[in-house]
Image (tube, grey):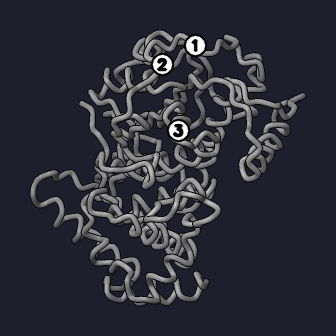
Amino acid sequence: MKFRTQGSPRTTWAALLAFLALLCGAPLARAQDTSLEEFEEVDPYTKGDPAALERLGIVRTGAMPWTESHSSDGVRSALGGIPVIFLETAHFRVASTLESYRPKGDAIEKAALEAEFAALKKKLRGFKAPAKLDPWLRAHLYAQRAEKLYADFTRAFGIKEEDFLSLEAKAKEGRPMGQGPYLGQKNKYTLLITESASAMARYLRAHFQVEPEYSYRAKWPDGYILAVNWESFEQNGRDLDICLHTAVVGALAQNLLDGYRDSHQAPPNWLRYGVAHWFARKVDERWNQWNAGGTGDLEADKLYVWEPRVFGLVKNEACTKWRDMMAWKGYEDIQPREHMIAWAAVDWLLTARADTARSLLFELGTPVTDYGPERPAKLLAQQERAFTKVWNQTPEELDKAFATWVLKNYRK
């Protein structure tokens, strides 16, 4: 049985969160994938050397398990038999059909890539910064980016590997932590990045009976998957690798949160979307915008600079109340500007209240398996209990504490 994650297809490109399950109506191009770039069968950076792979944190390349229903061969078959690079790390399995990418001179992307190249140079003997990112290098970069997010996520919330040992005993004690070692999942998190929209669509049609254009997050019985394609980003004016990088990090952060304790998506939506924004904006805040108006000119509007906008909402008493945020049932309940507020709430949690982040996530991630009509009420009650137990505050008291922090830290 397969489960789609929370979300809704309602969107426009101007209000894009590329990491949501977007279902836009643009036609799919390159249906036959006849022009896909060929690449070497053996990784040219490690040449399959076990020591080199270990330095990169790669467990294996090539044929591997994927999810309980199919292996890497099943992935390749569903994609139409096109060439695929498979990399497995400590916490992820990555499948990539990305072609070569030549940076376009964007200063922020250039700095980010230089930092990543410097890190690779320490691990790979003889590595030199290339003029373009070939298919193998792109696959390696996304594997490294996924693992960096995992480390950042677990560090931010104080999560430890040992939290997911002795799972049966913990469940009997009333502290269920899920079904496996990967934040509570049995299987590693899977990441499918395709060059073409049509290839991604073939895979998702085969396994989830959907055809989103940009990306899709979903749950397998034993783990989570994110599927995303490069072509849709290129065709919609986001033709920098850092645009895709930002989107992938935001979406994977949501999968890590949803996977935690195998909670059946118990964490509230203000936390889910806030976490996605918080980690994505660490990559490049320009491409995590939620454009509520403006010309679309990033430099002219600076709509991606959220601190002063949140400051203005709080100062003018136009900020959404905590009790209202607690009741968000899904994407359709959240107004564009409220994504900024959800991000600020998580920023507050992970900075001003960082010492309580672990305890709060544990309480909010307590599994709620009831999907009946009582579920919304149970999720609300769980949030109230968490705020009382961890912070000893009511939602109304949180409004005041949060507003005070914003006015002090987000000054114009």
What is the crowding at mark 1: few (fewer than 14 residues within 10 Å), some, or many (at least 20)? few
Secondary element under disc 1, as helix, strand or loop, is loop
- Report the residue at 68% width, 25% height from top: 100
> Is 379 rendered above or below residue 166?
below
Q: Position of residue 293 (x, y in %)?
A: 44, 65
> Is 137 rendered above or below residue 404?
above
Q: Position of residue 210 (x, y in %)?
A: 29, 30
Looking at the image, residue 326 sits to the left or right of residue 375; the answer is right
Q: Which residue is mark 3?
A: 233
**Closer to the camera in the image, 224 or 246:** 246
- Give the quarter of the image for residue 37: top right
Q: Position of residue 404 (x, y in %)?
A: 49, 90
Q: Which residue is mark 2?
A: 30
- Give the quarter of the image for residue 4: top left
- Report the residue at 77% width, 44% height from top: 105
Secondary element under disc 2, as helix, strand or loop, is loop
